[in-house]
Image (cartoon, grey):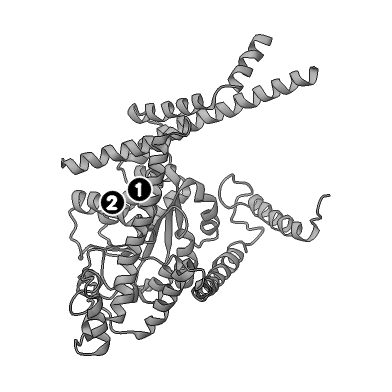
Amino acid sequence: MSKIQNTFLKIGSIDRRWIFLIIAAVVIVPLLIPVGLPIRPTDTTKNVYDSIEKLPVGSKVLLSVEYSPSTRPENHPMTISILRHLFKNDHKVFITCLWPDGQFMAQDAINQVAKQEFNKTYGIVYVFLGFRPGNEAVVKDIVSNLRKLYTVDVYQKKIDEIPLMKGINNFKDFDFLFSSSAGFPGTIEWVQYASDPTGIPMASGVTSIKVNEVMPYVQAGQMVGVLAGMPGAAEYEALINQKGSATSGMDAQSVAHLVIVLFIILGNVSFFIERNRSKKY
Amino acid sequence: MEFSTILGAWVAVFLTIGIFSYLYKDNPFYKTAEHLFVGVSAGYWTAIFFWTQIQPNLFGRLWPATEYYASSLWYKLYNVFGVFSSVFPEGGIAKGHDMHLIYLVPFAMGIMMLLSVSSKLSWMARWGIAYTVGMAAGLRAYGFLNSNVLGQIKGSAFQLVNSNLPFFALVGDSIFNNFVILIGHITGLSVFYFYREHT
């Protein structure tokens, strides 16, 4: 018995750098050799999918990109899948960014989906308005008068000369909003200053850590649904039948979570053994 | 693939591993990556802010190309700045704006905020900061009241016993869950009235 206890104590006093190394290994291996764990869409993900499916052909959808490279593995697959779904259903897409880095993330998504996969025409099917500084004030401006804020697009082309922008003056001219968000400013600001005051439906894709902040808005009906972190992105990939980086990332994330839970259990066992021994002496 | 793309990827790999190397211990590779990140971020944000807001939306409204008149005093001043031709191009700034001289007010406030670096003139920065804080507080008060107070109250108002709902469901609406929400509300609010400091 004491041999087993000693083993647990040894595990408990292991150098933290070994733990980092093990976590790195369990993340890398499933990425190289996918396990193929099953993915079942949750209600909140299905609601986002259904809302986009229900939009009439040619609906005007505002896609806001609010994340940076640090959360790209979680947010980017959402943006890619949503773009694929919107173009597949022949909707018009207007892309804005509340984060400066979001402009580059959005450009990557446009290059991959709009240009390479769907070969969509710029200015007719989609338009890239880009980033404007000002946080929630930008959202307010889009709601009141978009043209005051955006006189040119990302490529410095005048808004008045872009055919798709005809008749688009403020947020009420859109039919749906999807916010791919990693924090402030992001989904919550869109709910507070755009969707709630105007009644235009919105959905969001957020990082796992932000889900708890956003979920009350979904449950209160202020948002139609949410893609919750990488699992949400993988579920959406399953719904549109096009697997991507979120699906393969889920294997790595799930295995890493299991290993972390195992470490927590081992750490606790070691702690209680040590405490019992110190009480004896 | 272009050489610059390959080089960029190698630099990204080097910097990423440099950052992760901190997990082992502090080292010069980590320090290099950290300092580069802070410096590049500051430069990048400044450039983005300037070229997406200050140049097109501030200067573009003060000296628009649509109202360019070379012999007017206002545009003579503009032409003095013309040495920075990428910011102040010849013939005014063509970003689709009309002239709005009211934008001189935020322009002045912005300059006043930058004066915080001077010990003698730093008091002027308070004006710009006061305006920004006031504007943000007003905006946020409205947003929170509308969405976080009214919207959430509306969302949690429901019929407690609804015959169309199942008695119990792990996920989604059910009579049992309605009672859980009601009890949660009452007990949550009670905390604020009955909480006593533990000494």
Q: In which quarter of the image is the N terminus of chain B?
A: top left
- Please determine whether, in this image, residue B145 is positioned above or below residue A115: below
Q: Which amino acid does label 2 sit on?
A: Ala
Residue on which the image places disc 1: A76
Q: How crowded is mark 1: few (under 14 residues within 10 Å), some or many (20 or more)?
A: many
Give the crowd class for mark 2: few <14, some 14-19, many >=20 residues within 10 Å: many
Q: State the residue in front, A166 or B104.
A: B104
Q: Relative to B33, is A175 above or below?
A: below
Q: Looking at this view, is A202 or B65 the one in front?
A: B65
Q: Do the residues labelled 1 and 2 touch (CB within 8 Å)?
A: yes
Residue A144 x, y percent position in the rendering: 40, 76
Taking depth in this image into account, of A176 and B7 the one nearest to the observer is: B7
Q: What residue did someone put label 2 on?
A: A109
Q: In the rendered view, does A66 fall on the left or right side of B71?
A: right
Counting residues from the start of the chain, the first of labels 1 and 2 encountered is 1
From the viewer's perspective, tell me whether residue A69 is left or right of residue B154.
left
Chain label for disc 1: A
Residue extending farthest front: B120
Q: Quadrant of residue A151?
A: bottom left
Left or right side of B156 for A237: left
> In the image as oriented, which residue stretches furthest toward the right?
B199
- Element on which disc 2 rests: helix
Say which residue appears at 28% left-offset and 51% top-offset. Answer: A109
Q: Position of residue A8 (x, y in %)?
A: 62, 18
Q: Which chain carries label 2?
A: A
Secondary structure state at the residue bearing disc 1: helix
Residue A55 pos. (x, y %)? 34, 62
Question: Is residue A1 visible in the rendered structure shown here?
Answer: no
Please give the name of the residue rendered at 76% of the width and 20% of the height, measured from the top-left corner: A278
Q: What residue type is labelled 1?
A: His
